[in-house]
Amino acid sequence: MSTSNEKRLERQKLHSIRKELFLDEIKKKKIANQVFFWLDQSPWKTIGFYYPICEEIDLFPCIKLWSSLDKSRQASLPVIENNTLIFKGWSTQTKMTYGYKGIPEPHGTQEIKPEVILIPCIGYDKSKFRLGYGGGWFDRYLACHRNIKTVGICYERCLLDSIHPQPHDIPMDWIITENQIF
């Protein structure tokens, strides 16, 4: 998978797998539960997560529960401003507007620098590199914020031998699937 065309083909294949797996409510719930229990046992108070698109795992219910258990916890969602990814605060009361590519994002909240970010993956490898959509938004953000911890969220079946990482690719600190956290 060394060329962009090979990565594009791999993304298409993995997206088809994810589309099939998205119908499995048990797997989706298992991943969300894994995320909740991992977060609830972690020391972090500020997290970034994502608005689910294209059969990504919906983490809103577990983030709502996680933040409700401790009022000092704060969640945030990505926003594209001036062609740059940032995170803005989110709660159940946050007004949402349509942003980049029609993805809902928080409106009227402050920018937040999360301590840990939950990042959707189309695929991943055992070295914890993730395959995303290829836009590079998360990689560019993380290159400027090296101290932020990262967690890739993916289905177990989307494991690859290698994504053949490029110099700009940044490995995740953890990967959470329906069967494991590593």
Image (spheres, rainbow, N blue to C red):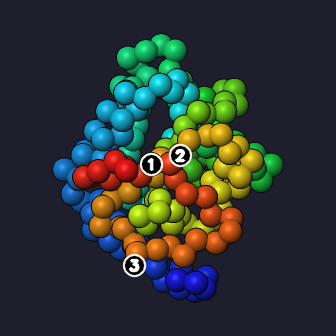
- State the SS at label 1: strand
Tag 2: amino acid: Thr
Q: How far is the residue under mark 1 from the one under mark 2?
A: 7 Å
Label 1 with label 2: CB-CB less than 8 Å = yes
Q: Badge 2: how crowded within 10 Å, few (<14), some, or many (20+)?
A: many
- State the SS at label 2: strand
Tag 1: amino acid: Trp
Q: From the top left corner, tell me how far across and down residue 55 is, in percent.
A: 38, 59
Residue that numbered label 3 is attached to: 13
Tag 3: amino acid: Lys
- State the SS at label 3: helix
Residue 39, image quadrant: top left
Residue 106 vertical position relative to residue 30 in the rendered view, above or below: above
Q: Nearer the viewer, mark 2 or mark 3?
A: 2
Tell me the residue at 31%/33% (across/down).
37
Labels 1 and 2: the sequence-earlier one: 2
In the rendered structure, find residue 150 and report the number of the disc placed on it: 2
Q: From the top left corner, tell me how far across and down residue 166 is, in percent.
A: 64, 72
Residue 95 seen by the camera: no
In the rendered structure, find residue 96 and report the number of the disc placed on it: none
Front position in the image: 83 or 176:
176
In the rendered structure, find residue 174 and report the number of the disc placed on it: 1
Front position in the image: 78 or 178:
178
Q: How far is the residue under mark 3 from the one under mark 1?
A: 23 Å
Image-based side of 115 in relation to 39, left or right: right
Tell me the residue at 66%/30% (across/down).
112
- Looking at the image, how many numbered discs can be counted on the residues? 3
Tell me the residue at 40%/18% (across/down).
68
Outermost residue toward the top? 71
Label 3 with label 1: CB-CB less than 8 Å = no
Q: Badge 1: how crowded within 10 Å, few (<14), some, or many (20+)?
A: some
Labels 2 and 3: the sequence-earlier one: 3
